Image: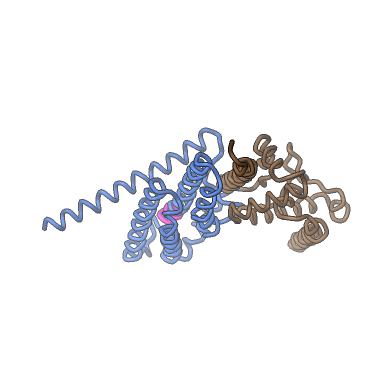
Chain colours: A blue, B brown
């Protein structure tokens, strides 16, 4: 009994941390848009942030090692800091896209008679898992830097991709069009 | 209407190929190509101008073709490592300046690479590029310093 309660407590704590980090990330995004620097989280030339090309570059340990071996400590530290900031912004972009998909899904299925609870529970679970993984990833990037977090990135991207697939699978055919329209409208606004 | 759209796309593609084969292929290195393509952009309007290409096609088709080439080159550069970027800078310096160390000194001060980022590029990609270029320039300057001090330290002491 006590083991179970400890386990529950641990899960709740981790979820709280993830929720906090996720909200903090969104606030950061908002602040950046507000300060007029324009450092938002849009994609590269319409590239998908879930695309692994850019993340591979940001999280590649080769660059950090090369810079550390070739420049002064100060330059290497600055490079590490810049890469960490970029990695955190990339993570926010991925999170933002997943959250947008989920919000669009919720809007589309609201009041839908053909809703399948089992699929919705599966989706909810996948979303929770993604939040957990991205929360841990945020912590690892922040504490240890992007190169150390490289292995977790693949897992988070895989989860995000799965989540996107599940939102598409779960959605009834007619509603899918509505979601696409909503997403297009969102893109136009951006 | 659709046919016109397809035709225009074909025109842009033909102009893009023409630019890539006749001009960009003769430029050594992607960094030099990026500088060249960015130099054809009007700072105020963000539009590209190339008289020869506009004469062969139209102003609008030429502009779109240059923009597409600019994006392609930038994308290739952003996905290359800092080590490769250092090599690109050395190549650019050896062909366009007296030396890569001189290039590093001037670029670190003037930061002309900031205006080479394509207009449609996301802030994240732009920041990654600028950070990588800054690191590559720091490496070139550091190498220059080492090259300067190493012969001095090799001299016999008093």
Residue at the outermost left position? A1
Considering depth in this image, is A105 or A96 the residue closer to the camera? A96
**Who's the residue at 84% across and 53% down the image?**
B53
Residue A167 is a magenta residue: no
Locate the C terminus of chain B by quadrant: top right
Main secondary structure of the magenta stretch? helix
State the image coordinates of residue A5 (x, y, percent, origin top left). Answer: 15, 54
State the image coordinates of residue A59 (x, y, percent, origin top left). Answer: 49, 54
State the image coordinates of residue B152 (x, y, percent, origin top left). Answer: 63, 40
**Span colored in magenta:** A101-107
Res. A116 in view: yes
Residue at the outermost front position? B158
Considering depth in this image, is A17 or B156 the residue closer to the camera? B156
Locate the N terminus of chain B by quadrant: bottom right
Considering depth in this image, is A43 or B2 the residue closer to the camera? A43
Horizontally, residue B145 falls left or right of residue B24, namely left
The answer to whether B53 is drawn above or below residue A170 in the figure is: above
Res. B133 in view: no
Horizontally, residue B137 falls left or right of residue A7, namely right
The answer to whether A154 is drawn above or below residue B36 in the figure is: below
| Marker count (numbered) | 0
The answer to whether A25 is drawn above or below residue B25 in the figure is: above
**Who's the residue at 11% across and 58% down the image?**
A1
State the image coordinates of residue B110 (x, y, percent, origin top left). Answer: 68, 35
**Who's the residue at 85% across and 51% down the image?**
B54
Considering depth in this image, is A4 or B11 the residue closer to the camera? A4
């Amino acid at each position: 009994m006590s083991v179970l309660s400890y386990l529950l407590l641990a899960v709740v704590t981790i979820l709280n941390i993830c929720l906090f980090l996720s909200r903090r990330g969104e606030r950061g995004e908002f602040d950046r848009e507000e300060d007029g620097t324009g450092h938002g989280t849009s994609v590269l030339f319409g590239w998908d942030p879930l695309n692994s090309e850019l993340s591979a570059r940001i999280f590649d340990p080769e660059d950090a090692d090369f810079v550390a071996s070739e420049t002064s400590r100060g330059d290497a530290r600055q490079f590490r800091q810049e890469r960490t900031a970029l990695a955190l912004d990339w993570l926010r972009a991925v999170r933002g896209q997943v959250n947008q998909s989920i919000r669009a899904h919720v809007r589309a299925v609201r009041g839908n008679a053909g809703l399948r609870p089992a699929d919705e529970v599966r989706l909810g679970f996948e979303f929770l898992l993604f939040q957990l993984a991205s929360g841990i990833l945020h912590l690892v990037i922040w504490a240890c830097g992007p190169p150390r977090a490289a292995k977790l990135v693949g897992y988070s991207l895989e989860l995000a991709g799965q989540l996107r697939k599940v939102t598409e699978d779960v959605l009834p055919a007619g509603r899918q069009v509505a979601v696409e329209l909503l997403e297009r409208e969102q893109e136009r606004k951006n | 209407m659709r046919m016109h759209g397809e035709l225009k796309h074909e025109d842009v593609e033909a102009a893009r190929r023409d630019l890539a084969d006749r001009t960009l292929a003769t430029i050594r290195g992607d960094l030099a190509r990026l500088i060249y393509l960015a130099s054809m952009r009007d700072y105020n309007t963000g539009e590209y101008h190339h008289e020869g290409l506009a004469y062969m096609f139209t102003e609008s088709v030429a502009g779109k073709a240059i923009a597409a080439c600019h994006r392609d080159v930038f994308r290739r550069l952003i996905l290359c490592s800092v080590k490769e970027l250092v090599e690109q800078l050395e190549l650019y310096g050896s062909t366009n300046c007296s030396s890569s160390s001189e290039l590093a000194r001037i670029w670190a001060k003037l930061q002309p690479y900031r205006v080479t980022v394509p207009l449609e590029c996301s802030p994240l990609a732009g920041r990654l590029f600028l950070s990588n270029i800054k690191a590559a320039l720091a490496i070139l300057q550091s190498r220059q310093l080492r090259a300067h001090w190493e012969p001095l330290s090799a001299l016999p002491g008093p």
